[in-house]
Image (tube, coloured by chain):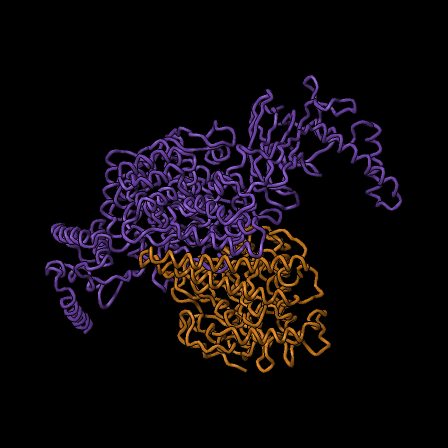
Chain colours: A orange, B purple
Amino acid sequence: MNPQPALSTRRNFLRGAGVMLSLPWLESLGGIVHAADAAKEPRRLLLVCLPLGIYRDSFVPKQSGTSYELPEYLAPLADLRDRFSVISGLEHPGVNGGHAAQPRIFTGVPSTERNRHSLDQHVANVLGQHTRFDSLALSAGANDFGWTDGGSMVPAEKNAADAFAKLFAEDGAANKTKVLAEIGRGKSILDHVLDEARDLQPRLSKRDQEKLDEYFESVRATEKRLVKSEEWMHQPKPKVDAKPPAPFAPDEIITNLRCVCDLTHLAFKTDSTRVVTFGYFRQDSVVVPGVNIGYHNLSHHGQDEGNIAQLKRVERAFFDELKTLLTNLKSTREGDSTLLDRTTIVVTSNLGSGNSHSNKDLPVLVAGGRFKHGQHLAIPPGTAPLSNLYLSVLHQLGFEDKSFGTSTGPLKELDLI
Amino acid sequence: MMKLRVMRILAFALLIASSANAAVPAPVSGFMQTYCINCHGEKKQKGDFRVDKLQVSTTAADAENWQLVLDNLHLGEMPPEDEKQPSAAEIEKITTWIQSELSRATAALKGAGGEVVLRRLNRAEYQSTIADLFDVHGDFTSGFPEDMREHGFDNNGAALMLSAAQMQEYMKAAEFVLARAIAPSARPETKSTTLTLHDGNRRAIELARKNLESRLANFDSLTPQEKANTRKMEEAVKANPESHGYRFPVLENGTLRPPKASDGPHLDAVMTVQQYFSGGPALSYPGRAAGWCKVKAIAFAMRNDGKPTRLKFSVGRPGPGVIPKVETVFTFTDDKPREVEASYYMEPGERVMFTMIDGAPHSQGRAMIDQPGPFIGIRSFSIEGPIYETWPPKGHRTLFGDIDPAQPTPEKAAAIVAHLAPKLFRRPVDAAAVTKYRALFEKFAQSMTPDEALRSMLAAMLVSPRFLYHEEPPGEPDAFAIASRMSYFLWRSTPDDELMKAAADGSLLDAAKRRAQAQRMMADARTARFLKDFTGQWLRVREVGAMKANADLYPEYDAELEAAMRGETEHFIAEMFQRDLPLSQLIDSDWTMLNQRLAKHYGIAGVLGPDFRRVSLDKLKTVRGGLLTQASIHAVTSNGSTTSPVIRGTWLLEKFLGTPAPPPPPDVPPIEPDIRGATTINEQLSKHREVAACASCHRKIDPLGFALENFDVIGGWRESYRALKDGQGKRKTLADGKPVHPADEWAGVGRFSSFQEFRELVKKREDLVVQNLTNQLATFALGRAPGFADRQPLKAIATKTREKKSGMKSLVLDLVSSPVFANP
């Protein structure tokens, strides 16, 4: 991987496009012009997890194939039917432990091994070269899904207003100068400590030397980040019409989700990043009409009808917002295509059943991108790893990986358009 | 036909076994062939274990496998009951050989495996290291990526990863710390503010007057309801022209009355309600830079019937929904005014709010005075800060010692590094390293002011690998490595000067001197960090509250109970430690640590107030006593709605007995909980016993869980399960479900028909409990799981502790002075 050419291409482009970038986005100009070179259309990835499961009867269609009947949760998505697929029966082999499986949902690393290397981070290493942010980890109550190669969790932007500011708020000129000076200083500090680590290395045991490699890698990666943010400091941030999200209480889960979906749409639309992850979760009480029991307790519904009815209200709210997001992506044109056609969306859960907190037979919805959609793929449970889908997603995004996680090959039932 | 195939496979396995295990004596491999190979060989590998792969130990992993065989034979776990059983003589012959093999391997493999891996400061260690070095406190680690846990603890060297995100957080934290640690050139003035409730009354009365004026001015535009309210206000003002809108009744000659304009500012006034519309009384931090301040109240209880009445100080930024960063609760029981005080590290813009916990819900005017109580009388609130014990303050002295950092030159910068680096890096630093920092200062000074250059150089020191990691030389750790091991074990923080001195003169390499140092350290308040962190992770009680109890099923559950649950176990372990009580009391004790809320939950009378204290238990009246009866344990092994014997059994095996079960095979069907009252957990789990693939492990796990079945989701005692029935309104009502059946059999130990009988059985296995605690402490102390070579010394420590009936403190001392602690 060599980031140099991509960087210079981007810089040249931005110089030319500087004037236009400072204008509000005008779709009438014939779509948004992007930093990516014109020959290669931008590809994006959105990963969403519902860590408490998705109530099966309301999500998994009774029939397989293309003429399935839309279950309750998917009914609002009727207009988009040909732009998504439901997949049932996939799971991560060797990933277990109920909630403990949550951080492994996009890595597929078996529970006996140290978790590392998530799909979003893998993709961001390449797609991130074109954008201000390699990837964006947002949160509607949860996000421990992003994992670096070395096995460190990628912290999420927990506050929607902060995320908005990061994407769109322009620093004042004085502040910019200060930040640039900070970056310069940071680079010198990193050079120094790298040198110090080199001096330290021969004084350590072989095993500790291997561990210290993480330090070298992290310092180098931090330097790269500083270089990148320095490059982008010279470019104005995109202007958007949207207002920064107003503060909300932690239990306002729908408001939170709506903010996160809007941010995702704006981030893709302005090409601020091409990789986004978020989760929809809350342990405690949630502000959803007709719901007075905590979300987590609802997921352990114990077959109680009242609990199930309330659980469905919380989960239906998610699919209502998902519909808005998909619709927004679909109606945003980019070149001769739409954002939905250029974004692959995977919605899933680490729990196949919230009630038992089992990690088998996980619910999956795949939307957008270049997949042939409009079907329910009912895969016999236990026959294919979820990572097979991830491998298909990688291929569809233009990656040539031979495997990902515990994949045994691409998910052959999922065709490209 | 079938039999023939089995025999063929057996013959094949024998062939492999005999070729691979040339040195395993024939009687041993013969035993394995007879009793083990069917499940642990070529054909099946239950528990992912094969006896045909066993060989005379050339690695620690080989030895671990033999140890596993030995443990299973000793515990009577294997062969399973329904398989062919060896005679006692046969078992003895085999175990004798394995033991001799293990002794041989221990000697041969000394130092192999189980080494401490280069440890990074985890979040808690970083936070306390900064606090102890620089007296800087605050929220500078909340953006750090979470530290992963391995072997139950988040200080495991191998699992402590680093990433660019973490590096950037370290850089940010360095700025935060330096901005607060470097003192300004002039000592900031210490200011103090005093507030009486009557001050608050004056402001409230003025506010109410203005409110009425503006309402009257816009009367026509008001809604009918607002108009009616406004008329009422007018009436109220007529009745009390001097005091309309007041918030605190004043106390004069023992009676409460509304305030008068003529009242002097020093009259006592009374808080009567929990919440005031426009916030309660509060005082802002008077400093312009972060620092320590002292907050005082002079207060007394009123109309409280002798019951404790609580006043809370909450520190934080003002604003709706902002969670206070720290709270202190004081209890008053009588009407004698008493001064209480607390110290806080505060930032400009923060304030202290004063609230009354036990007061009535909101009310106004005369209604406040007529509340039944309890009330809290307040003479005054005051705040004083920033307070410096010394000048320059501690952080500044740590950074610069006696050097004046003003107008730094390269020479000065070098002197500062020479002073600071050994403290920061926890070992001596050579001249070459100092020179490099000096060069860094000079580089910075080309483009910055000398002050900025110095600060930047210091920032580099705070992200240096030598600060962030514990540097240990290859082979045996040196005295400085031992010092860090000790202080990060017992204080969760950096060594102090005395410990560094003991490192410098090499005395820490001597076991007896190490013991003496540990004894000194354990008398220090910093040990509380170790106890809390260790208890929270070992027993998982820091997770209490992660799964809130279902409010319909457990309406009595609240935040106070949640905190009290955690509090009991933390205080219990701290008490066990401080008094070095025999470890058998972990299993059963005739005392526990309670406060009022938890005592009420347990149905124990006579415990008043929020503070934890040791309470003697009447064992004829209560089941409580020992860790297994503590609500925190029951809560962390529940999901908030239901309990599962599998989860609880697993907790007991892993956390209490130290004999974890292997992970479940991949294809187990999950249990779908049902709270409709139709099936019991016993019925659901009976599957585990019927399916052979499950039975071997679940016969070990489930009974232990069933023993705790009488404890509900929040640790209450239950004879039957709670169920929900449709009630009158929308809300469900509670009902008794099916009865609880706690009876079962603990394989190899005995049958029990109640929790109490089970606890008697656990007493027979005190050896397991003590060994487990020893191993857990060793894991936490060294940031790694005990290796094979540590087994014998750890066993010796546990045995000695049990035989001498000594406690956790002795155990920790033995651990620190044992070779395990000073191994690579």
Question: Residue farthest to the top?
Answer: B253
Where is the C terminus of chain A found, in terms of image quarters? bottom right
Left or right for A395, reference B581: right
Q: Is residue A91 left or right of residue B700?
A: right
- The image quarter in which residue A264 lies: bottom right
Using the image as rendered, state which of residue A225 and residue B710 is in the foreground. A225
Q: Position of residue B781 (x, y in %)?
A: 35, 45
Answer above or below: position of B107 versus B383. Answer: below
- For this rendering, which residue is in front, B705 or B654? B654
> Quarter of the image holding residue B246?
top right
Residue A391, position in %: x, y?
46, 74
Rendered view: A154 above or below B290? below
Answer yes or no: is residue A175 visible: yes
Percent across and percent down for residue B591 are 38, 31
Q: In this rendering, would B542 be left or right of B336?
A: left
Task: Say which of B36 and A51 sits in front.
Answer: A51
Q: How many marks?
A: 0
- Residue B554 vs A82, above or below: the answer is above
**As rendered, which of B791 and B478 lies closer to the eye?**
B478
Answer left or right for A168 relative to B627: right
In percent of width and height, residue B307 lies at: 56, 26
- Most extreme residue toward the left, as rendered? B26
The residue that appears at 62% across and 73% down in the rendered structure is A78
Question: Is residue B712 in view from this perspective?
Answer: no
